Image: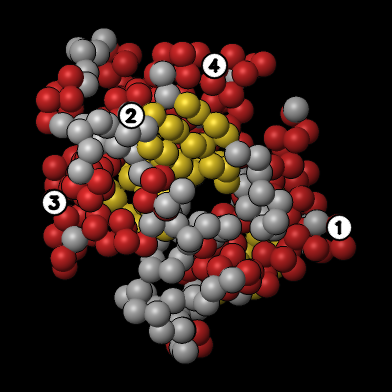
Amino acid sequence: MDSTDSYAAAASTEELTKRSPEPLDSEEADSAEKPTHIRFLVSNAAAGSVIGKGGSTITEFQAKSGARIQLSRNQEFFPGTTDRIIMISGSIKEVVSGLELILDKLHSELHAEEGSDVEPRRRLRLVVPNSSCGGIIGKGGATIKSFIEESKAGIKISPLDNTYYGLSDRLVTLSGTFEEQMRAIDLILAKLTEDDHYSQNVHSPYSYAAGYNSVNYAPNYAPNGSGGKYQNHKEEASTTVTIGVSDEHIGLVLGRGGRNIMEITQMTGARIKISDRGDFMSGTTDRKVSITGSQRAIQQAETMIKQKVDSALERANE
């Protein structure tokens, strides 16, 4: 299947109007305003279409929806794919609006190429933290079954890819018409946003991409996406950020024989130092974990540290 088939089909103006939400009660209104985000995959060509000439399209979509729209850099792909990551953040209403605008544009362009009057069933791949997938699945698969029945969309959650060390995101593939997929997204996003950890875990859409790409199959690329390899790592400002990790969980960061911390250091380029036993963050029983490097390296390392702890805790709770 061509990579462009992974984009959801969007609807005509009339169909978009049909999805106008009914008035919300106060509790639903509060939930709709809760900060959230969604990440999904697009091809490099489609990413260019979303950005537009001189950034005109993405600027317009952000103004219309009120959402923030970010893309991973040129050639920075989700591990194991050749697709870039788009992240839309804001309130639920803003995120859904931004997603509709993007998918409508992508579909219109595909539809023009295909010239068919029949709306095809397409695929859209969402990127969801492994720790949040349990909420979508539900006990005995009850939640995902109800989502499929209610939306009429196909929903499949990929297994965690252990090929890429430290990766804790899974792909949730939605298949169907635009209407079916948007109903499924409404349900999934509402469920994810109930999870406070998911709402707080808003990093850049490519927080792991450079590390995995450089290790596995592609070089890091220059900030302008021109394809020039970084030549000036030493010129990047180096700072230190200190975070707290519960004393009982510090072993998860270290790993057996220091394996985890060495892996994080190698993949991000950051230097990591853990405080001695009894040396805690002020007023807590959290050990100090100092991360030194560029802002990008620090963000990647912090994300991987949190993922190590979260994935181990999830396994312990199963």
**3D distance between C-alphas at marks 2 and 1:** 47 Å
Dot 2 or dot 3: first in sequence order is 3
Looking at the rendered image, the disc whose residue lies closer to the viewer, 2 or 3, is 2
What whole-number distance in Å separates the C-alpha atoms at marks 4 and 3?
A: 37 Å
Q: Amino acid at mark 4?
A: Lys
Residue type, mark 3 in image: Glu
Q: Which residue is mark 4?
A: 145
Secondary structure under tag 3 reads helix
**Do tag 2 and tag 3 residues touch (Cβ < 8 Å)?**
no
Residue at numbered disc 2:
177
Query: Label 3: which residue?
Result: 60
Mark 2 crowdedness (10 Å alpha carbons): few <14, some 14-19, many ≥20: many
- Are the residues flagged by discs 2 and 1 in contact, CB closer than 8 Å? no
Q: Say what amino acid the circle numbered 2 marks.
A: Thr
Pointer 1 or 3: first along the chain: 3
- Mark 4 and mark 2 in contact (Cβ < 8 Å)? no
The quarter of the picture where the C terminus appears is top right
* Residue drawn at (25%, 55%) of the image: 50
Residue 293 percent coordinates (x, y): 55, 74
- Circle 1 is placed at which residue position? 256
Residue ID at (67%, 58%): 164
Q: CA distance from mark 1 to mark 3?
A: 49 Å
The Cα atoms of the two marked residues, 2 and 4, are separated by: 18 Å
Q: Under tag 4, what secondary structure?
A: helix
